[in-house]
Amino acid sequence: MSANKAPKNHVFYRNQNWHYPRIQKGEGVYLFGEDGKKYLDACSGSAVANIGHGNKEIAQFAKEQIERVAFTHLSRWTVDVIEDCAAKVCEWAPGDLNHVYFVSGGSEATETAMKMARQYYIERDGKKSSKWKIISKWDSYHGNTLGALSMTGHPGRRKYYDPMLANFPKIPQFYHYRNPWGCKTLEETSIKAAEALEAEILKQGADNIAAFITEPVVGSAIPGVHPEKIYFQMVREICNKYDILLIVDEVMAGFGRTGEKFAVNHFDTVPDIIVCAKGMSAGYTPMGATICNEEIFETIMVKGSGNFIHGHTYASNPLSCGISLKVLEIVERENYLDNAKVQGKYFMEKLNELYKYPIIGDVRGVGLMAGLEFVKDQETKEPFETSENVKGKFTVNCLAEGIVPYPGGGSADGVRGDDTLLAPPINITREEVDELFTGLEKAIAKTC
Ligand code: PLP
Protein backbone atom coordinates (compact mmCIF):
# COMPACT_ATOMS: atom_id res chain seq x y z
CA MET A 1 0.00 0.00 0.00
CA SER A 2 1.34 3.41 -0.88
CA ALA A 3 1.60 6.28 1.57
CA ASN A 4 -1.30 8.72 2.04
CA LYS A 5 -4.01 6.11 1.39
CA ALA A 6 -6.36 5.00 4.14
CA PRO A 7 -5.62 1.33 4.91
CA LYS A 8 -8.45 -0.94 3.71
CA ASN A 9 -8.57 -3.73 6.25
CA HIS A 10 -7.26 -2.14 9.36
CA VAL A 11 -9.88 -0.16 11.31
CA PHE A 12 -12.73 2.21 10.59
CA TYR A 13 -11.11 5.45 9.50
CA ARG A 14 -13.43 8.41 9.42
CA ASN A 15 -11.25 10.45 7.11
CA GLN A 16 -11.33 8.88 3.68
CA ASN A 17 -9.42 11.86 2.36
CA TRP A 18 -6.29 10.55 3.97
CA HIS A 19 -3.34 12.89 4.45
CA TYR A 20 -1.22 10.92 6.86
CA PRO A 21 1.69 8.78 5.64
CA ARG A 22 2.44 5.39 7.18
CA ILE A 23 4.90 5.91 10.05
CA GLN A 24 8.24 4.10 9.92
CA LYS A 25 9.65 5.09 13.27
CA GLY A 26 9.52 7.60 16.08
CA GLU A 27 12.37 9.27 17.91
CA GLY A 28 12.03 11.93 20.60
CA VAL A 29 9.42 14.48 19.54
CA TYR A 30 9.55 13.31 15.91
CA LEU A 31 7.72 10.78 13.79
CA PHE A 32 9.28 9.67 10.49
CA GLY A 33 6.89 8.98 7.60
CA GLU A 34 7.22 6.65 4.63
CA ASP A 35 6.97 9.79 2.52
CA GLY A 36 10.53 10.61 3.66
CA LYS A 37 9.32 13.47 5.87
CA LYS A 38 10.02 14.16 9.52
CA TYR A 39 6.99 15.29 11.56
CA LEU A 40 7.11 17.08 14.90
CA ASP A 41 4.46 15.37 17.02
CA ALA A 42 2.79 18.49 18.42
CA CYS A 43 0.07 16.51 20.19
CA SER A 44 1.89 13.37 21.44
CA GLY A 45 -0.68 11.32 19.51
CA SER A 46 -3.51 12.50 21.75
CA ALA A 47 -1.58 13.82 24.76
CA VAL A 48 -0.09 10.36 25.25
CA ALA A 49 3.59 10.13 24.21
CA ASN A 50 4.74 12.30 27.11
CA ILE A 51 8.37 11.16 27.17
CA GLY A 52 8.70 11.13 23.39
CA HIS A 53 9.00 8.26 20.94
CA GLY A 54 11.53 5.44 20.69
CA ASN A 55 12.75 5.43 24.29
CA LYS A 56 15.48 2.75 24.44
CA GLU A 57 15.37 2.39 28.22
CA ILE A 58 11.67 1.48 28.06
CA ALA A 59 12.35 -0.93 25.19
CA GLN A 60 15.05 -2.71 27.18
CA PHE A 61 12.88 -2.83 30.30
CA ALA A 62 9.86 -4.19 28.37
CA LYS A 63 11.99 -6.98 26.90
CA GLU A 64 13.23 -7.98 30.33
CA GLN A 65 9.75 -7.82 31.87
CA ILE A 66 8.27 -9.98 29.09
CA GLU A 67 11.02 -12.53 29.66
CA ARG A 68 10.34 -12.45 33.43
CA VAL A 69 6.50 -12.44 33.33
CA ALA A 70 4.13 -10.56 31.01
CA PHE A 71 0.73 -11.68 32.25
CA THR A 72 -0.90 -12.79 35.47
CA HIS A 73 -4.59 -12.49 36.35
CA LEU A 74 -5.58 -9.90 38.95
CA SER A 75 -7.98 -12.26 40.71
CA ARG A 76 -5.22 -14.59 41.91
CA TRP A 77 -1.74 -13.15 41.61
CA THR A 78 0.33 -10.13 42.35
CA VAL A 79 3.78 -9.25 40.97
CA ASP A 80 6.42 -6.87 42.33
CA VAL A 81 6.00 -4.43 39.42
CA ILE A 82 2.23 -4.19 40.02
CA GLU A 83 2.76 -3.32 43.67
CA ASP A 84 5.63 -0.93 42.93
CA CYS A 85 3.62 0.85 40.23
CA ALA A 86 0.63 1.19 42.59
CA ALA A 87 2.92 2.63 45.27
CA LYS A 88 4.42 5.12 42.80
CA VAL A 89 1.02 6.22 41.42
CA CYS A 90 -0.29 6.75 44.97
CA GLU A 91 2.88 8.64 45.91
CA TRP A 92 2.13 10.96 42.96
CA ALA A 93 -1.57 11.30 43.79
CA PRO A 94 -2.69 14.07 46.16
CA GLY A 95 -4.12 13.66 49.68
CA ASP A 96 -5.20 10.21 50.80
CA LEU A 97 -5.79 8.79 47.34
CA ASN A 98 -3.92 5.66 48.32
CA HIS A 99 -5.62 2.85 46.42
CA VAL A 100 -5.39 2.17 42.73
CA TYR A 101 -7.31 -0.03 40.31
CA PHE A 102 -5.33 -0.56 37.10
CA VAL A 103 -7.15 -0.87 33.77
CA SER A 104 -6.17 -0.57 30.09
CA GLY A 105 -7.19 2.97 29.17
CA GLY A 106 -9.20 6.10 29.89
CA SER A 107 -12.72 4.84 29.14
CA GLU A 108 -12.20 1.79 31.35
CA ALA A 109 -10.90 4.09 34.08
CA THR A 110 -13.96 6.37 34.00
CA GLU A 111 -16.33 3.36 33.91
CA THR A 112 -14.49 1.91 36.89
CA ALA A 113 -14.93 5.19 38.79
CA MET A 114 -18.69 5.25 38.04
CA LYS A 115 -19.16 1.75 39.37
CA MET A 116 -16.91 2.39 42.36
CA ALA A 117 -19.01 5.44 43.29
CA ARG A 118 -22.27 3.46 43.04
CA GLN A 119 -20.92 0.51 45.02
CA TYR A 120 -19.50 2.85 47.69
CA TYR A 121 -22.99 4.17 48.51
CA ILE A 122 -24.54 0.69 48.48
CA GLU A 123 -21.88 -0.65 50.84
CA ARG A 124 -22.27 2.42 53.06
CA ASP A 125 -26.07 2.91 53.05
CA GLY A 126 -27.48 -0.46 52.01
CA LYS A 127 -28.88 -1.95 48.79
CA LYS A 128 -31.74 0.55 48.70
CA SER A 129 -29.40 3.50 48.21
CA SER A 130 -30.85 5.75 45.51
CA LYS A 131 -27.52 7.40 44.81
CA TRP A 132 -26.55 6.36 41.28
CA LYS A 133 -26.61 9.37 38.95
CA ILE A 134 -23.34 11.01 37.93
CA ILE A 135 -23.51 14.72 37.14
CA SER A 136 -21.18 15.74 34.32
CA LYS A 137 -20.89 18.58 31.83
CA TRP A 138 -21.60 19.55 28.28
CA ASP A 139 -18.44 20.14 26.24
CA SER A 140 -16.66 17.30 28.03
CA TYR A 141 -15.20 13.95 27.05
CA HIS A 142 -14.90 10.97 29.37
CA GLY A 143 -14.62 8.11 26.89
CA ASN A 144 -16.48 6.14 24.26
CA THR A 145 -17.78 3.05 26.07
CA LEU A 146 -21.45 3.37 27.04
CA GLY A 147 -20.96 4.30 30.69
CA ALA A 148 -18.22 6.78 29.87
CA LEU A 149 -20.29 8.11 26.97
CA SER A 150 -23.25 8.60 29.32
CA MET A 151 -21.03 11.07 31.20
CA THR A 152 -19.60 12.61 28.03
CA GLY A 153 -21.17 15.91 26.99
CA HIS A 154 -20.55 15.86 23.27
CA PRO A 155 -23.71 15.62 21.14
CA GLY A 156 -21.87 14.41 18.06
CA ARG A 157 -20.32 11.46 19.86
CA ARG A 158 -23.59 10.56 21.58
CA LYS A 159 -26.18 11.00 18.84
CA TYR A 160 -26.57 7.41 17.52
CA TYR A 161 -26.30 5.84 20.95
CA ASP A 162 -28.62 8.09 22.93
CA PRO A 163 -31.21 5.36 23.69
CA MET A 164 -28.44 3.16 25.11
CA LEU A 165 -27.03 5.78 27.47
CA ALA A 166 -27.74 6.34 31.16
CA ASN A 167 -29.79 9.45 31.80
CA PHE A 168 -27.14 11.46 33.65
CA PRO A 169 -27.67 15.21 34.27
CA LYS A 170 -25.38 17.66 32.48
CA ILE A 171 -24.40 21.18 33.49
CA PRO A 172 -22.43 23.86 31.56
CA GLN A 173 -18.65 23.75 31.32
CA PHE A 174 -16.31 26.49 32.68
CA TYR A 175 -15.91 27.61 29.07
CA HIS A 176 -15.22 31.29 29.56
CA TYR A 177 -14.83 32.26 25.87
CA ARG A 178 -18.42 31.26 25.11
CA ASN A 179 -19.90 31.29 28.60
CA PRO A 180 -23.70 31.33 28.75
CA TRP A 181 -23.83 33.79 31.66
CA GLY A 182 -22.29 36.82 29.96
CA CYS A 183 -19.39 36.80 32.45
CA LYS A 184 -16.53 39.19 31.76
CA THR A 185 -13.79 37.39 33.71
CA LEU A 186 -12.69 33.78 34.04
CA GLU A 187 -13.23 34.04 37.77
CA GLU A 188 -16.90 35.02 37.30
CA THR A 189 -17.38 32.16 34.82
CA SER A 190 -15.74 29.74 37.27
CA ILE A 191 -18.12 30.82 40.04
CA LYS A 192 -21.20 30.54 37.80
CA ALA A 193 -20.10 27.08 36.60
CA ALA A 194 -19.68 25.91 40.20
CA GLU A 195 -23.05 27.38 41.19
CA ALA A 196 -24.61 25.40 38.32
CA LEU A 197 -23.52 22.22 40.10
CA GLU A 198 -25.34 23.15 43.29
CA ALA A 199 -28.47 24.11 41.33
CA GLU A 200 -28.46 20.75 39.52
CA ILE A 201 -27.99 18.81 42.76
CA LEU A 202 -30.99 20.62 44.26
CA LYS A 203 -33.03 19.92 41.12
CA GLN A 204 -32.19 16.21 41.04
CA GLY A 205 -32.14 15.68 44.80
CA ALA A 206 -28.80 14.91 46.47
CA ASP A 207 -30.13 11.47 47.43
CA ASN A 208 -30.08 10.50 43.77
CA ILE A 209 -26.55 11.68 42.99
CA ALA A 210 -23.48 9.49 43.51
CA ALA A 211 -20.80 11.70 41.98
CA PHE A 212 -19.80 14.71 39.96
CA ILE A 213 -17.12 14.22 37.28
CA THR A 214 -15.04 16.97 35.70
CA GLU A 215 -11.85 17.35 33.71
CA PRO A 216 -9.42 19.78 35.42
CA VAL A 217 -8.27 21.13 32.05
CA VAL A 218 -10.57 20.16 29.20
CA GLY A 219 -9.07 17.86 26.56
CA SER A 220 -10.60 16.88 23.26
CA ALA A 221 -14.01 18.60 23.64
CA ILE A 222 -12.70 22.18 23.99
CA PRO A 223 -8.93 21.79 24.31
CA GLY A 224 -7.11 23.83 26.94
CA VAL A 225 -10.19 25.27 28.66
CA HIS A 226 -9.64 25.56 32.41
CA PRO A 227 -11.18 27.34 35.40
CA GLU A 228 -9.78 29.58 38.14
CA LYS A 229 -8.87 27.95 41.45
CA ILE A 230 -12.14 29.10 43.00
CA TYR A 231 -14.09 26.66 40.81
CA PHE A 232 -12.54 23.59 42.38
CA GLN A 233 -12.69 25.04 45.86
CA MET A 234 -16.43 25.70 45.49
CA VAL A 235 -17.06 22.33 43.84
CA ARG A 236 -15.21 20.51 46.62
CA GLU A 237 -17.35 22.28 49.23
CA ILE A 238 -20.58 21.59 47.34
CA CYS A 239 -19.74 17.88 47.00
CA ASN A 240 -18.98 17.68 50.74
CA LYS A 241 -22.16 19.57 51.64
CA TYR A 242 -24.44 17.24 49.64
CA ASP A 243 -22.51 13.98 50.24
CA ILE A 244 -21.43 13.53 46.61
CA LEU A 245 -18.12 12.10 45.41
CA LEU A 246 -15.84 14.32 43.35
CA ILE A 247 -14.23 12.49 40.43
CA VAL A 248 -11.52 14.32 38.49
CA ASP A 249 -10.80 12.99 35.00
CA GLU A 250 -7.03 13.38 34.50
CA VAL A 251 -6.87 11.03 31.52
CA MET A 252 -5.35 13.77 29.37
CA ALA A 253 -4.08 16.26 31.92
CA GLY A 254 -2.45 13.90 34.41
CA PHE A 255 1.13 12.70 34.87
CA GLY A 256 2.95 15.93 34.10
CA ARG A 257 1.17 17.24 31.01
CA THR A 258 0.35 20.56 32.74
CA GLY A 259 3.61 20.80 34.71
CA GLU A 260 2.11 19.27 37.88
CA LYS A 261 1.86 15.59 38.73
CA PHE A 262 -1.91 15.96 38.38
CA ALA A 263 -3.60 19.05 36.94
CA VAL A 264 -5.95 19.30 39.91
CA ASN A 265 -2.89 20.25 42.00
CA HIS A 266 -2.99 23.66 40.27
CA PHE A 267 -6.30 24.17 42.05
CA ASP A 268 -5.23 22.94 45.52
CA THR A 269 -8.07 20.44 45.60
CA VAL A 270 -8.11 16.80 46.61
CA PRO A 271 -10.84 14.82 44.83
CA ASP A 272 -12.25 11.49 46.07
CA ILE A 273 -11.34 9.68 42.86
CA ILE A 274 -8.87 10.44 40.07
CA VAL A 275 -9.08 8.65 36.74
CA CYS A 276 -6.01 8.60 34.54
CA ALA A 277 -4.37 6.91 31.53
CA LYS A 278 -2.41 8.23 28.51
CA GLY A 279 0.76 9.89 29.93
CA MET A 280 0.86 7.25 32.66
CA SER A 281 2.51 4.81 30.25
CA ALA A 282 3.35 7.47 27.64
CA GLY A 283 1.97 5.20 24.91
CA TYR A 284 4.48 2.39 25.47
CA THR A 285 1.61 0.13 26.54
CA PRO A 286 -2.17 0.49 26.99
CA MET A 287 -2.73 1.63 30.56
CA GLY A 288 -5.18 3.43 32.81
CA ALA A 289 -6.07 3.68 36.48
CA THR A 290 -8.75 4.68 38.94
CA ILE A 291 -7.29 5.99 42.18
CA CYS A 292 -9.58 6.31 45.20
CA ASN A 293 -9.30 7.63 48.73
CA GLU A 294 -9.19 5.69 52.02
CA GLU A 295 -12.90 6.21 52.74
CA ILE A 296 -14.05 4.55 49.50
CA PHE A 297 -11.55 1.72 49.77
CA GLU A 298 -12.29 1.01 53.43
CA THR A 299 -16.05 1.13 52.88
CA ILE A 300 -16.01 -1.39 50.04
CA MET A 301 -13.03 -3.56 50.84
CA VAL A 302 -12.66 -3.51 54.65
CA LYS A 303 -15.97 -2.67 56.31
CA GLY A 304 -18.12 -3.80 53.37
CA SER A 305 -18.33 -6.87 51.15
CA GLY A 306 -14.64 -6.87 50.34
CA ASN A 307 -15.53 -7.45 46.72
CA PHE A 308 -15.59 -4.66 44.16
CA ILE A 309 -17.83 -6.17 41.48
CA HIS A 310 -15.72 -5.30 38.49
CA GLY A 311 -12.75 -6.62 36.55
CA HIS A 312 -11.11 -6.75 33.15
CA THR A 313 -8.75 -9.43 31.87
CA TYR A 314 -5.95 -6.88 31.54
CA ALA A 315 -6.53 -5.20 34.92
CA SER A 316 -3.19 -4.91 36.74
CA ASN A 317 -1.27 -6.31 33.80
CA PRO A 318 2.33 -6.77 35.00
CA LEU A 319 3.90 -5.67 31.72
CA SER A 320 1.82 -2.47 31.61
CA CYS A 321 2.42 -1.77 35.30
CA GLY A 322 6.18 -2.29 34.90
CA ILE A 323 6.36 0.00 31.88
CA SER A 324 4.27 2.71 33.60
CA LEU A 325 6.50 2.54 36.66
CA LYS A 326 9.54 2.99 34.43
CA VAL A 327 7.90 5.94 32.62
CA LEU A 328 7.16 7.68 35.93
CA GLU A 329 10.72 7.05 37.16
CA ILE A 330 12.09 8.61 33.97
CA VAL A 331 9.79 11.65 34.33
CA GLU A 332 11.07 12.11 37.90
CA ARG A 333 14.74 11.48 37.15
CA GLU A 334 14.81 13.79 34.12
CA ASN A 335 12.74 16.55 35.80
CA TYR A 336 10.19 16.55 32.99
CA LEU A 337 7.59 18.19 35.26
CA ASP A 338 9.81 21.26 35.53
CA ASN A 339 10.45 21.11 31.81
CA ALA A 340 6.70 21.05 31.11
CA LYS A 341 6.32 24.15 33.33
CA VAL A 342 9.17 26.08 31.69
CA GLN A 343 8.49 25.10 28.06
CA GLY A 344 4.72 25.34 28.67
CA LYS A 345 5.06 28.95 29.82
CA TYR A 346 7.23 29.80 26.82
CA PHE A 347 4.88 27.98 24.43
CA MET A 348 1.81 29.81 25.80
CA GLU A 349 3.60 33.16 25.40
CA LYS A 350 4.33 32.31 21.76
CA LEU A 351 0.76 31.08 21.16
CA ASN A 352 -0.62 34.38 22.44
CA GLU A 353 1.19 36.11 19.54
CA LEU A 354 -1.21 34.30 17.20
CA TYR A 355 -4.09 36.69 17.94
CA LYS A 356 -2.69 38.79 15.10
CA TYR A 357 -4.25 36.26 12.71
CA PRO A 358 -7.98 36.92 12.17
CA ILE A 359 -9.02 33.26 12.52
CA ILE A 360 -7.66 32.94 16.07
CA GLY A 361 -10.55 33.41 18.49
CA ASP A 362 -9.21 31.94 21.70
CA VAL A 363 -5.82 30.77 22.96
CA ARG A 364 -5.86 28.89 26.26
CA GLY A 365 -4.13 26.17 28.21
CA VAL A 366 -2.04 25.07 31.15
CA GLY A 367 1.56 23.85 30.86
CA LEU A 368 1.97 21.85 27.67
CA MET A 369 -1.78 21.34 27.17
CA ALA A 370 -2.92 24.14 24.90
CA GLY A 371 -5.90 24.81 22.69
CA LEU A 372 -6.63 27.18 19.82
CA GLU A 373 -10.16 28.04 18.75
CA PHE A 374 -10.71 29.20 15.18
CA VAL A 375 -13.39 31.76 14.35
CA LYS A 376 -14.71 33.49 11.26
CA ASP A 377 -14.89 36.80 13.09
CA GLN A 378 -12.62 37.66 16.02
CA GLU A 379 -14.91 40.50 17.12
CA THR A 380 -18.24 38.66 17.16
CA LYS A 381 -16.76 35.16 17.82
CA GLU A 382 -18.83 33.87 14.90
CA PRO A 383 -17.78 30.28 14.23
CA PHE A 384 -16.96 28.86 10.81
CA GLU A 385 -19.56 26.69 9.09
CA THR A 386 -18.71 22.99 9.33
CA SER A 387 -18.74 22.91 5.50
CA GLU A 388 -15.84 25.38 5.45
CA ASN A 389 -13.69 22.64 7.04
CA VAL A 390 -11.25 25.09 8.59
CA LYS A 391 -9.88 22.56 11.03
CA GLY A 392 -9.26 20.17 8.13
CA LYS A 393 -7.48 22.85 6.10
CA PHE A 394 -5.41 23.88 9.12
CA THR A 395 -4.41 20.26 9.76
CA VAL A 396 -3.34 19.72 6.15
CA ASN A 397 -1.35 22.97 6.23
CA CYS A 398 0.32 21.85 9.47
CA LEU A 399 1.26 18.47 7.96
CA ALA A 400 2.82 20.28 4.99
CA GLU A 401 4.99 22.17 7.51
CA GLY A 402 5.90 18.89 9.28
CA ILE A 403 3.75 19.63 12.33
CA VAL A 404 1.09 17.25 13.71
CA PRO A 405 -1.72 18.91 15.71
CA TYR A 406 -4.65 17.01 17.27
CA PRO A 407 -7.73 17.82 15.22
CA GLY A 408 -10.06 17.28 18.16
CA GLY A 409 -12.55 19.72 19.58
CA GLY A 410 -15.25 21.58 17.72
CA SER A 411 -18.76 20.65 18.77
CA ALA A 412 -20.13 18.05 16.41
CA ASP A 413 -23.60 19.62 16.69
CA GLY A 414 -22.16 22.51 14.67
CA VAL A 415 -23.14 25.06 17.32
CA ARG A 416 -19.65 26.41 17.73
CA GLY A 417 -16.36 26.57 15.92
CA ASP A 418 -13.28 24.52 15.42
CA ASP A 419 -10.53 23.92 17.93
CA THR A 420 -7.24 22.09 17.97
CA LEU A 421 -5.15 20.62 20.76
CA LEU A 422 -1.41 21.25 21.00
CA ALA A 423 0.31 18.98 23.50
CA PRO A 424 3.85 18.00 22.49
CA PRO A 425 5.91 15.52 24.55
CA ILE A 426 6.78 17.05 27.92
CA ASN A 427 10.49 16.55 27.28
CA ILE A 428 10.40 18.98 24.34
CA THR A 429 13.32 21.44 24.22
CA ARG A 430 13.08 25.19 23.70
CA GLU A 431 14.56 24.83 20.18
CA GLU A 432 11.88 22.25 19.36
CA VAL A 433 9.17 24.59 20.72
CA ASP A 434 10.53 27.26 18.36
CA GLU A 435 10.44 24.82 15.45
CA LEU A 436 6.89 23.81 16.35
CA PHE A 437 5.76 27.42 16.59
CA THR A 438 7.38 28.44 13.30
CA GLY A 439 5.58 25.64 11.43
CA LEU A 440 2.32 26.30 13.26
CA GLU A 441 2.38 30.01 12.47
CA LYS A 442 3.03 29.33 8.76
CA ALA A 443 0.11 26.87 8.72
CA ILE A 444 -2.21 29.41 10.37
CA ALA A 445 -1.16 32.18 7.98
CA LYS A 446 -1.92 29.84 5.07
CA THR A 447 -5.31 28.89 6.55
CA CYS A 448 -6.43 32.54 6.90
N1 PLP B 1 -11.24 11.07 29.52
C1 PLP B 1 -10.57 12.05 28.89
C2 PLP B 1 -10.45 13.39 29.55
C3 PLP B 1 -9.99 11.82 27.65
O1 PLP B 1 -9.33 12.81 27.03
C4 PLP B 1 -10.12 10.54 27.05
C5 PLP B 1 -9.53 10.28 25.72
O2 PLP B 1 -9.15 11.14 24.99
C6 PLP B 1 -10.83 9.55 27.74
C7 PLP B 1 -11.36 9.84 28.97
C8 PLP B 1 -10.99 8.19 27.14
O3 PLP B 1 -9.76 7.53 27.15
P1 PLP B 1 -9.47 6.31 26.16
O4 PLP B 1 -9.48 6.86 24.76
O5 PLP B 1 -8.12 5.83 26.60
O6 PLP B 1 -10.52 5.28 26.39
Image (cartoon, grey):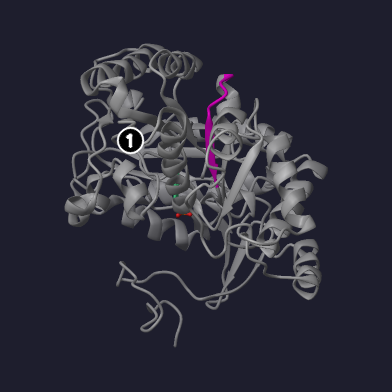
Q: Position of residue 144 (x, y in %)?
A: 36, 54
Residue 133 lies in what quarter of the image? Answer: top left
Figure check: 18 above or below 297: below
Look at the image and give the residue range highlighted in magenta: 268-276
Figure check: 380 above or below 143: above
Residue that mark 1 sits on:
132
The residue lying toward the viewer, choosing from 422 and 116, is 116
**Residue name at image x 37 percent, y 77 percent:** 6
Q: Position of residue 419 (x, y in %)?
A: 35, 43
Residue 269 colored in magenta in the image: yes
The extreme bottom residue here reads: 1
Q: Position of residue 92 (x, y in %)?
A: 70, 36
* Quarter of the image where the N terminus is located: bottom left
The residue type indicated by label 1 comes to Trp
Residue neighbourhood size for the residue with mark 1, other residues' Cα within 10 Å, grouped as few (<14), some (14–19), many (≥20): some
Residue 236 colored in magenta in the image: no
Residue 194 lies in what quarter of the image? Answer: top left
Figure check: 400 above or below 390: below
Q: Is residue 183 visible?
A: yes
* Quarter of the image where the C terminus is located: top left
Q: Is residue 441 visible?
A: no
Q: Position of residue 227 (x, y in %)?
A: 44, 22
Q: Secondary structure at mark 1?
A: loop
Q: Is residue 419 toward the left or the right of residue 42 in the image?
A: left
Residue 25 lies in what quarter of the image? Answer: bottom right
Q: Is residue 177 toward the left or the right of residue 388 in the image?
A: right
**Residue name at image x 45 percent, y 56 percent:** 398
